[in-house]
Amino acid sequence: MAILWPRTIPRSILEDSRRSAEVRVYNQLAKALDDSFSVFYTRPWVGLDRLGNEIDGECDFLIAHPTHGILAIEVKGGGIEFDPERDQWISVDRGNFPHKIKDPVAQARSAKHEIRKRLKNSRRWNPRFIHEAQGVIFPQSERIKGDLGSDRPRKLFCCQGEFYTDLRGWISRRMNEGKRPQNCEDLGKDGMAALEELLAKPFKLSFVIGAALSEAAEDFQALEPSQYQILETISEIPRALIRGGAGTGKTVVAIEEALKSAAAGRKTLLTCHSRPLATNLERKLKNIENLTVAGFHALCGHISRKAGVPPPSNISERELYESALPNALYRAMEVQPALKWDTIVVDEGQDFSTDWWIAIDACLSHGGHLRVFMDSNQRVYERAGNGVHDLSVVPVRLSRNLRNTKNIHSAASVHYSGPEIIADGPDGLEVSWINAENPDAKLEAAYKELRRLVFKEEVAPGDIAVLVNGPAARTGFLERSGGTSIPLTDAETMALEDVVVDTVRRFKGLERPAIILIVSGDEMDGRELAYVAFSRARAYLCVVSSQGETKWLSEGLQDT
């Protein structure tokens, strides 16, 4: 039996009635030839015409023998006709319907020349004269009795009768077995190897993570409009508390509500606790008329100074942030009520202390609108934001995760307890867990993963964040990656084309398509950091941790 490429015919070809003649030829060649012959079926290529334009070509079958050379074969099924007036070949099917076809002799001849050219250029073969021939098989047509033209001698054709009774003999005659011209040499083993490389070369192109991130981005973009439906729900509610887990679109909706309010001519404030998040919001929303965007404590300092009631300076930093700055903001509103806002939008409200809400309430004009967006994770934020309920807010719930893939949502959900959240995104990639038992090994593993993502998986640096548990681990990673050509930034600068390297706490409220999380011992002793860190990744999450850390971080993951 001949060596066949491919070994079996794909189902798509077997089920295609238009390819039935080729299937018959494939099966007959397999039976007629021994294993000294190799048969390559339907080998396409891209070539160039005389003007340099790309043209598609294909050889139905190429038969190769280390001694006898090569034979290019074109196959045409049905009855065959030729109209010389129009120079048109026609195949007539069983239903007597005519189909225009290309000149099979010209196709076989062109295939022979193309194979010769490619073989000559092969690095695996030393060019030499070998026997080359072409032929045409009409497996369903009657026997041809004579030549069909000066360039179509009878010997070129194999028709129904000899196809089933003398196919081996026809091939032998076309390849001049035993009658090879003196100037022709063997194709040789090197020629057979070269043909296999040209026509049946195996290759493997791995699915890159960069492609997965792009596909996920498209899926999430299609989901985004559904987030804005909540704006209609709260439009008639003066004071609304919108709660939802990570990924439910709180920040997206908060931004849209702030823009909507400002566009309506209302004096609007958008604020949050996290300075990196506030900086990111300021960058996105700068120079919007009627809109003030500021971190809460920066706002307190700016407004209190503007009103002439700055906080005392001879106090501790903790006292300054916990009470002095909020109290100064409250007094500023008493001194200058004209500074108040018509709409206040608070993002990440779970980070606000109870006393801060008193200052926020003082900043709202009479009849103004308050929108507070807060995480619903009771396991992490059980008592957070309690003071906001004293402001007569109406609770509204976000219940669909539109940011994280289902696999990342499942990983984060291990550290979530609260109202059910349904992940609407794609399944996405599995969470990657890399085991490393000591701090140096973790930094090295994370650095290798970063380089793999950028240089092998084709992930843009601006799509990646490396998150650590504290300043010491961040410094260690920056020192390890000091010689890299990959651009690095922090959460506050957040350069769009650079990899963010920062702590989980500072990255709170932000996100990137890919996250590498380095778990550093005792600093990751609470579920808040795990919950926040996992949910920062939109489409790819890699966790570098020890076996013990991996166990508790993923505990129950298989059951969610």
Image: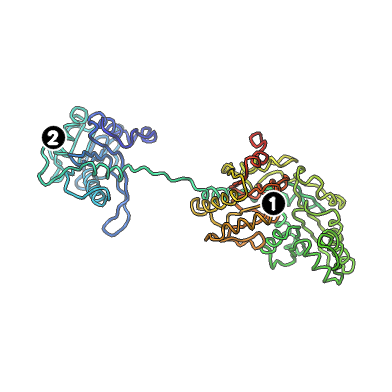
Q: Name the element at disc 1.
A: helix
In the image, which disc is placed on residue 145?
Answer: 2
Give the class, few, some or many, for how many residues have Cα within 10 Å of label 2's Cα (few <14, many ≥20): few
Q: Name the element at disc 2.
A: loop
Q: Is residue 176 left or right of residue 124?
A: left
Question: Residue 240: image x %, image y %?
Answer: 80, 51
Which one is nearer the viewer's eye here, 410 or 157? Answer: 410
Question: Residue 3: image x %, image y %?
Answer: 28, 34
For the residues labelled 1 and 2, say whether their Cβ atoms are less than 8 Å apart.
no
Label 1 or label 2, whichever lies nearer to me, is: 1
Quarter of the image containing the C terminus? top right
Q: Is residue 180 left or right of residue 28?
A: left
Q: Quadrant of residue 367?
A: bottom right
Question: Residue 456: image x %, image y %?
Answer: 48, 51
Residue 86 can be seen, yes or no: no
**How far is disc 1 from disc 2 in space, using C-alphas?**
77 Å
Q: Which residue is mark 1?
A: 228
Compared with 424, 145 (above or below) is above
Label 1 amino acid? Tyr
Residue 106 can be seen, yes or no: yes
